[in-house]
Image (tube, grey):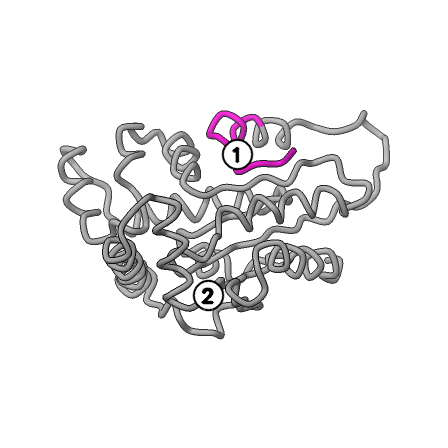
Amino acid sequence: MITSASAEHCLSFIHTQLQPHGKPGETTAKQVHRAVTISRQTGCGAAAIAAKLAEYLQQHAAGENRPWTVFDRNLIDKVLEDHNLPHRLAKSLHEDRASQLEEILADVFDVRPSVPTVIQQATETMHRLAAQGNVIIVGWGSNVLMAKMPQVLHVRLVASLAMRVEHVRQAHKLTESEAHKFCVTEDRARERYFRKYLDADINDPLLYHLIINTGWLGYEGAAKLIGDTVLNLPVE
């Protein structure tokens, strides 16, 4: 069963894909290196949809031996490893803490890397993952950072605030008021992250190939729609 991968599973995936395949002189069928980015409003069910999407693609992508793997919060572990950054940053470097990013870096480093440098390092990691194919990256402005990569489908998940509040309330065992505050705070933080560090508007529809209302289509329906679109992308 495909699940949202742990850091260990993700690193195993990367290691496997970087190994040479086949013997010298052997010919293999051309591989299609497809990837998906998912941007979301808080409470849209992105984690569940990403996991279902990985399952769906694994079942329907005939002849592919690479597992479809989801990178979300665990992406930062790969970024830190790739660029020799201290792993104590892992709990702090998140897209929903953009306003704290400079302060966090200043506390950790005597000579701190600039925020654009950290974002550039994250971009390099994302590009490396997408070039291997069969990855789903949730958040991090990945749709902007990977906008020029072919064979990458950019998806935005939205839903009514009422539906999202109810989802968050149940998932985190919060009161309705607490869940409402959580949704609004997280969404505003992501909007700030896009404006400040990516010079983009997260709500700009032209940044996405698909915008899906998960409150209308449901998680299974959203995963299937995205999956069918990915499977029908033209071969590069």
Q: What element carries label 2?
A: strand
Tell me, yes or no, whether the highlighted magenta stretch contains residue 165.
no
**Numbered circle sitting on residue 36:** none
Q: Is residue 174 left or right of residue 47?
A: left
From the top left corner, tell me how far across and down residue 198 is, in percent: 34, 61
Residue matched to label 1: 5
Q: Please name the residue shown 70% across and 28% down the image.
A: 20
Q: Please name the residue shown 53% across and 32% down the image.
A: 10
From the top left corner, tell me how far across and down residue 90 is, in percent: 31, 34
| Residue type highlighted by circle 1 | Ala
From the top left corner, tell me how far across and down residue 118 is, in percent: 31, 45
Q: Is residue 33 left or right of residue 97?
A: right
In the figure, 161 relative to 1: above or below? Answer: below
| Residue type highlighted by circle 2 | Val
Quarter-of-image position of residue 153: bottom right
Residue matched to label 2: 158
In the figure, 67 relative to 38: above or below? Answer: above
Label 2 crowd (10 A; few <14 / some 14-19 / many >=20):
many
Q: Please name the residue shown 71% across and 59% down the image.
A: 228
Tell me, yes or no, whether the highlighted magenta stretch contains residue 10.
yes
Q: Is residue 26 left or right of residue 136?
A: right
Q: Could you tell me how far apart the alpha carbons at marks 1 and 2 are, in whole angstroms?
A: 23 Å
Q: In this view of the protein, which residue sits in the foreground, 24 or 114?
A: 114
From the top left corner, tell me how far across and down residue 162 is, in percent: 37, 65
Label 1 crowd (10 A; few <14 / some 14-19 / many >=20):
some
Q: What stretch is highlighted in magenta?
A: 1-12
Q: Please name the residue shown 46% across and 65% down the image.
A: 158
Between circles 1 and 2, the one closer to the viewer is 2
Q: In this view of the protein, which residue sits in the foreground, 110 or 160?
A: 160
